[in-house]
Amino acid sequence: MDILKTGANVFLTGEPGAGKTHTVNRYVAYLREHGIEPALTASTGIAATHIGGMTIHSWSGIGIARELSPYDLDRISSNERIHRRLTKAKVLIIDEVSMLDGQMLGMVDAVCRAVRRSSAAFGGLQTVLVGDFFQLPPVSREGRAIYAFRSSAWDWLRPVVCYLTEQHRQDDAAYASLLAAIRCDGVDETHFELLRSRVSSREAVPRDIVKLFSHNVDVDRLNEQALAKLGGEAKSFMMLSTGPERLVEALRRSCLSPENLKVKKDAAVMFTRNDPERRFVNGTLGTVIGFSAMGHPIVKTRGGAEIEAEPMSWNIEDQGRPLASVQQVPLRLAWAMTIHKSQGMSLDAAMIDLGSAFEYGQGYVALSRVRRLSGLYLLGCNERATQVHPEVLEQDRAFREASDAAAAHMVSRSVAARAAAEHNFIAACGGRAPRKSKDGSAPAASFMEKAKEENAKAYARWSPEEERTLSSLFRAGVSAKEIARRMERQPGGIRSRLKKLGLVADKG
């Protein structure tokens, strides 16, 4: 947050459950408190609906184009609506950048420069790229896709890497170690034994948990068959919409709730939105136990809560102005879904078929949806399921080192210097000045500053000697907590460094 508030271009990354979405939401709230409306975009329609924004293709005016000629740039620049959108923007956020082809990122950069008449990267916009390259890679219609970090636009942008290293999803140390091993290409026989211990037959899988498959045809067949087996008539909920048909159709395709939702009593369902009142999140599982007086499904979650699933809206917005909207009950049948559509969700339990995994990162995305090993039921698992792209492995080491350096640099700056940078950025964006405390004092020290005050080594660089000591202690069986005490480091910093060195730490 300290780095973002200075207006720096940022690549925000970290493993699933590290808090990327939470951090983005915090920053968006901060900008809006200061009168600045960020442009919220994502690489896919599904991801865009999660953040209440639009696809980067639509926002930039590029659409389905695969390359831009000088004529195309002139045409886009002459479009009054797009010209107004891009010139008014101050901050551009692109979520799920891992699924954005490098060529497309370059095209967005070119459009921003042309429309904003600036030679600066992305036309001088603060650009925040969010994602995890260990997850699903970009899709290319022809030829081999290029990762966004290989784009010349990435080089021009030179984003500050902010790598979130704390884990907030998995609370099972053994399972967390398996996922960490996949990220560092360190899967060994111990980890395969963990996976084999969770192999189940279809008959042994609990009836009310979601099933994840690689292909849509398997998902549709299983959901339809399971619903048909339930007694009684299905109750239908049709999606309502407002706005231009082109935008509405994009929302329909990306919304996880179907256009015609059919459910019955005892149907296994999953919520497809986050509830502002925090009663449920995108991925909360449950069973329909009846219908309210208003006719809405009443869902009993696996945690025992009974929730009336009332219609919610999915919107496409531009600078805070609604362009199109669809409204639907935020549910979908949850006997099965694709691994692709599960990205971004947290599941208490899931049956996963990785026997036909065909893409780097596909197995990792599926496995990292589940919070603990006891909630994992495997039908099959091929060799590709535990593999991540070698190019990503190499780049991840560079990202971690860059993040460590960025954190150390930020801590070295005084509170006054950071406050001045924040003030200057808000002023440059035409926003309100940062609020001060009632007595007019400077902003309070950040969490990094406080950590530095409590521990002089907090966020400090690691020397080769310290890394050798850390490796020796870990291999001797010393716990991360004890290593932290001996080396005067934080336990989170110890675990992060162990991951970087390719070792797997015990959470204790």
Image: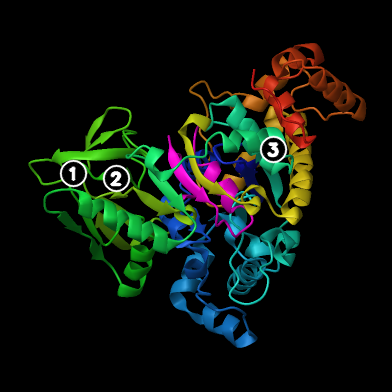
Q: Which residue is mark 3?
A: 181
Label 3 to label 1: alpha-carbon separation: 41 Å
Q: Is residue 9 magenta?
A: no
Tell me which residue sits at (53%, 75%) in the image: 62
* Depth order, front residue of 232/108: 232
Q: Which residue is mark 1?
A: 297
Q: Could you say whether the residue bearing mark 3 is in a helix, strand or loop?
A: helix
Q: Specify whether 350 is left or right of 454.
A: left
Name which residue type carries label 2: Val
Q: Position of residue 426 (x, y in %)?
A: 57, 46
Name which residue type carries label 3: Ala
Q: Could you say whether the residue bearing mark 1 is in a helix, strand or loop?
A: strand
Q: Could you say whether the residue bearing mark 2 is in a helix, strand or loop?
A: strand
Foreground mark, 3 or 1, reads 3
Q: Position of residue 352 (x, y in %)?
A: 48, 46
Disc 2 + disc 3, Cβ < 8 Å = no
Instruction: Please provide the residue range marked out in magenta.
Output: 342-371
Instruction: Assign the magenta stretch its main secondary structure.
Output: loop
The correct choice, above or below, for 413 with respect to 44 in the image is: above
- The answer to whether any part of residue 427 appears in the image is no
Disc 2 + disc 1, Cβ < 8 Å = yes
* Marking on residue 269: 2
